[in-house]
Image: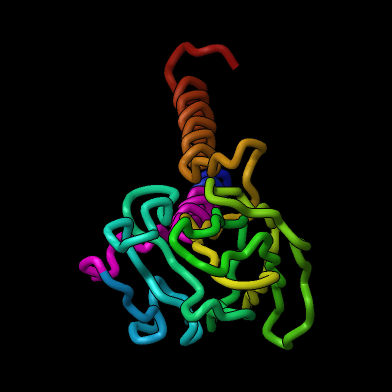
Amino acid sequence: MKKTLFALIASASLMLAGAANAGILGFEDVATDGDFAGLGDINPYAGLTFSDDWFAGDTGIDGYGNGAHGGTHFAVNGFGSDGATIGSATPFSFAGAWFAAPDGAADKASWIAIAAYDAANNLIGTTGPVAIGSSYTWAAAAFDNVSSLTITRDTGWFVMDDFTTAASVPPGGTVPEPASPLVLGLGAFALILGRARRRKAPGSAA
């Protein structure tokens, strides 16, 4: 019985660790105040390292009213830069992110592509070109053991929001609820514990 309990506790701990590592980065906590703020200036941000051509902005900036997918903040490839990167000293899983072309940009991207690399700079995979427009589009990925991402485009500016670090995302772009496996695990633990107590109770059937 003790071995079973220890195994269940260990499983629950692993589920909690997985939940802690899953999340959505919406840039809402970056101080922008109606202007752009360099994400490279606050590295590491949310455990990630952004190249100097990444900036955070908000929908109060002229021409960027469509810049946020959720909330009011977003990230943008400053100066219309190509090959903006996001890295981490600790490998992570990447599910994808939402992208659009900012309404106010004179030179707008019509597609983006995301390439993922491991710590040895080996290519893990790529999304290939994902067409984007003024409305947000989900760029789906399921890359594990990622140390860096490079985001390229055909030309000009794009905005990115709700950068999602999770192993996968179901159809429709909804993010899986990390607590669900934990709830199931705890439920199984409760059932086994209850059964063990009934067996020990006087007069209970074997």
- Residue 205 placement, left or right of 154: left
x, y percent for residue 172: 62, 36
Of residue 202 and residue 192, the one placed in the foreground of this image is 192
Question: In the image, 74: left or right of 168?
Answer: left
Indicate left or right for 26 with 138 as reference: left
Image quadrant for the N terminus?
top right
- Part of the protein shown in magenta: 10-34
Q: Is residue 41 visible?
A: yes
Q: Relative to 61, does residue 185 appear above or below in the rendering? A: above
Residue at x-position 51% and y-position 67%: 106
What quarter of the picture does the C terminus occupy?
top right
The image shows residue 103 at horizontal and vertical percentages of 47, 56
Magenta-drawn stretch contains 14: yes
Q: Position of residue 152 (x, y in %)?
A: 67, 73
Indicate whether 148 appears above or below 190.
Answer: below
- Percent from the top left, x then y, of residue 9? 48, 49
The residue at the point 39 percent across, 79 percent down is 39
